[in-house]
Image (cartoon, rainbow, N blue to C red):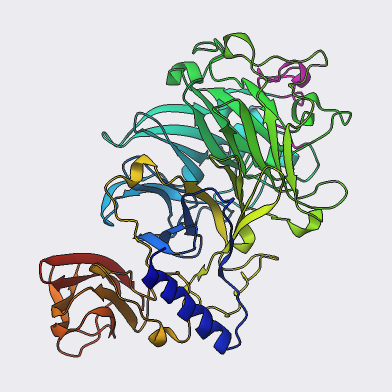
Amino acid sequence: MNIHKIIYFLVIVSALIGQGQEQTVGLFLNTSAAAPGYTLFAPMSYNVTYLIDNNGELVQSWFSDYRPGLSAYLLDNGDLLRTRRLQGQFFQTGGRGGGVEIIDWDGNLVWEFNYFSDQYWQHHDIESLPNGNVLLIAWEFKADMVAIANGRNPNFLGGNLQPSGFWPDHIIEVDPESNSIVWGWHVWDHLIQDYDSSKANYGVVSDHPELVNINYPDYPNNTENDWLHINAIDYNAELDQIILSVHHFGEIWIIDHSTTTAEAASHTGGNSGKGGDLLYRWGNPQAYMGVNAYERIFFGQHDARWIENGTQIMVFNNGSGRPGGPFTSIDVINQPIGEDNLYVLDSSGVYGPDALSWQYIATPPSDLFASSISGAHRLENGNTLICDGPQGHYFEVDSAGSLVWDYVNPVVNTGPLYQGQEIPTQGGSQGSTLNRTFRVHRYPTDYLGFTGHDLEPMGPIELYMNTQTITYSPNKFRLYQNYPNPFNPVTTLRYDLPEMGIVKITIYDMLGKQIRALIEHAQGSGPQSVVWDATNDYGERVGAGIYLYQIQAGAFVQTRKMALLR
């Protein structure tokens, strides 16, 4: 950290102490044991995705026209791949998205793909493949009569999705170059049931762990028509396999991606020779054995991914409904893969292993209970970055479980909070705050996507009451994201000037028409700001929408987007 940044933080700390404020957001701990890198997060209630360094300082942000719905990832070229939450009357359950988009480092939308209707809807998670394609999780509609024709117990129908019916999951692979679906897998092609002997898929469920029991969970009056609620997807390139977190089953599933779409709908083909049948499942043997003699491990899990070069699997086990009381654990298992990359049942007919290889539980366990969302990321140095999603709390532990980095998301639905400001709670959701976050990811300092991009720290995201006293000497031109954003009725535009000169700041609409010339005069060096009150050059209020703001200072030109609400 250079000297002006040190001064900057000292002034911030002094201002905070002088006001008698208790810290509520931002960086709480950063030790030398933390894995070096940059942490990406997309607050669920806001349209901006952030990248911070280990000091909790912003290094990059991306504005979108949409809230996340829910995942966001960095690509190898530095672009941001994120889900977008689209509005629609058909879905009132958690995790709904509707589409994906790619935004480049400069904030330009370079690709979008919407996948939503009254027949299907993308949700939760996405995965970028080595060939540039993107995997999406989505619901698909099946009418009640169709579900019954496939052996669904009529007592298990009904729910909170519209139109009413049955909504199993499927996976599609989208090619951004052609903007087309090039592969797909549907759980609907791999069903079994022991309820209605007149149906073709009737059989002994425990004899077919490769198939999915359409009547599990098997408790009466189950009105959850979001049947599986798959909430995580990850890809293993070496195996050409996909892992899925199946929330309502308490399981993780692995399927073969090497199949054609036709083979994925069958029981043969692909590297496994098993088509689209499940290659592996773990976490709740009761889902296919149907007996209580087998211990259930996962309870409401929300993240599953390969780690250690694909030799292990890590799961964020939320712990909702866990016997003995709810608490969250991070569970790791050794992947029990045998010859020909196939998974072998043990003598009792269940998949191993029979024990975890590593686990993190808070001390006491009740100190960490994330009832929903959330995730965990294994870092290059062996540490684990954990996201307590409902609380917007991100922290890193070493292999022994010791805390080495600690951060609380300072961004809510109205934008960044002031330090010391209480984090608002999410209405109707017990234990959830408005800074909630689906997951976080840390990318190492040498990540390929950072090549050629500016990662100079810009200060913390959170705001401070005495910001006018916080000064430093910038060494380069920079235009920051406006705050608040979205806004109504005013917003502040901040920028850095390393030298004195003529500065011009102009507001444009999305067609490039000038709306307001805010500044056009000489300014001295240092951090600067100007307020826009959403009026044009004639003093008239402008309408809601997306606007551009541009700074020109000598040869330096930079443009960003902002959103005005009415």
In the image, is residue 203 part of the stretch drawn in magenta?
yes
The residue shown at (46%, 50%) is 37
The residue shown at (38%, 65%) is 2
Q: Is residue 355 placed above or below 91 in the rendered structure? A: above
Q: Is residue 319 in view from this perspective?
A: yes
Please tell me whether the stretch drawn in magenta is mainly helix, strand or loop.
loop
Q: Would you say 514 lies left or right of 318 here?
A: left
Q: Is residue 377 placed above or below 478 in the rendered structure? A: above
Q: Can you give x and y, in whole percent of width and height, for residue 508 in the image?
A: 18, 72
Q: Quadrant of the N terminus?
A: bottom left
Q: Can you give x and y, in whole percent of width and height, for residue 214 in the image?
A: 68, 30
Q: Would you say 335 lies left or right of 207 here?
A: left
In the image, is residue 442 part of the stretch drawn in magenta?
no
Give whichever of 494, 87 is nearer the camera: 494
Magenta residues (range): 193-217
Q: Can you give x and y, in whole percent of width and height, for residue 293 in the image?
A: 89, 28
Q: Quadrant of the C terminus?
A: bottom left
In the current view of this chain or complex, which residue is farthest to the front?
Answer: 3
The residue shown at (66%, 19%) is 210
Q: Would you say 365 lies left or right of 151 here?
A: right
Give whichever of 541, 514 is nearer the camera: 514
Count of numbered labels shown in the rendering = 0
The residue shown at (44%, 60%) is 67
Q: Would you say 140 lies left or right of 376 here?
A: left
Q: Is residue 511 in view from this perspective?
A: no
| Location of residue 181 by image quarter | top left
Give whichever of 495, 425 is nearer the camera: 495
Give whichever of 149, 298 is nearer the camera: 298
| Location of residue 311 by image quarter | top right
